[in-house]
Amino acid sequence: MDTHTLQAFVTVAETGSFSQAAGRLFLTQSAVSKRISQLEEQLDTRLFDRIGRHIGLTEAGQALLPRARKVLLELEDASA
């Protein structure tokens, strides 16, 4: 797990879209999908329910989101 992966997770959760997250992060959609897949593999759980073109956070994703935001904010504060 790294900050780029957490940022991808947070951005997908906020936008509700892998494509929109990719645009915000200046990555390809496949790169964002790969980061999310790696994170899900590391945590051994699904973070998003994928239903057609719609996605939503699973219970595990909902639990991770505030923690991921906090980690990213603390790293940003440390850099400042």
Image: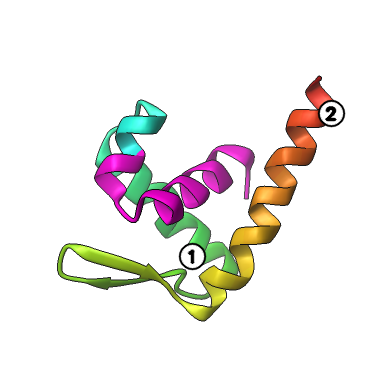
Residue farthest to the top, as pictured: 80
Q: Hey, which quadrant is residue 43 in on the image?
A: bottom right
Residue 54's x, y, as percent? 23, 65
- Residue that carries the numbered disc 2 in the rendered image: 78
Q: Amino acid at mark 2?
A: Ala
Residue 38's x, y, as percent? 47, 56
Q: Is residue 5 above or below residue 36?
A: above
Q: Is residue 27 above or below residue 52?
A: above
Q: Residue at x 51, y 50 (%)?
A: 10
Q: Residue at x 73, y 50 (%)?
A: 70
Q: Hey, which quadrant is residue 48 in on the image?
A: bottom left
Using a 10 Å C-alpha cutoff, classify the residue at mark 1 as few (fewer than 14 neighbours), some (14 to 19) or many (20 or more).
Answer: some
Q: Is residue 78 above or below residue 16?
A: above
Stretch in magenta: 1-21
User: Looking at the image, is mark 1 or mark 2 nearer the viewer?
Assistant: 2
Q: Residue at x 30, y 32 (%)?
A: 23
Q: Amino acid at mark 1?
A: Glu
The residue tagged with tag 2: helix, strand or loop?
A: helix
Label annotation for residue 63: none
Residue 16's x, y, as percent? 34, 56
Between the residue at mark 1 and the residue at mark 2, the CA separation in whole angstroms equals 27 Å
Magenta includes 55?
no
Label annotation for residue 40: 1
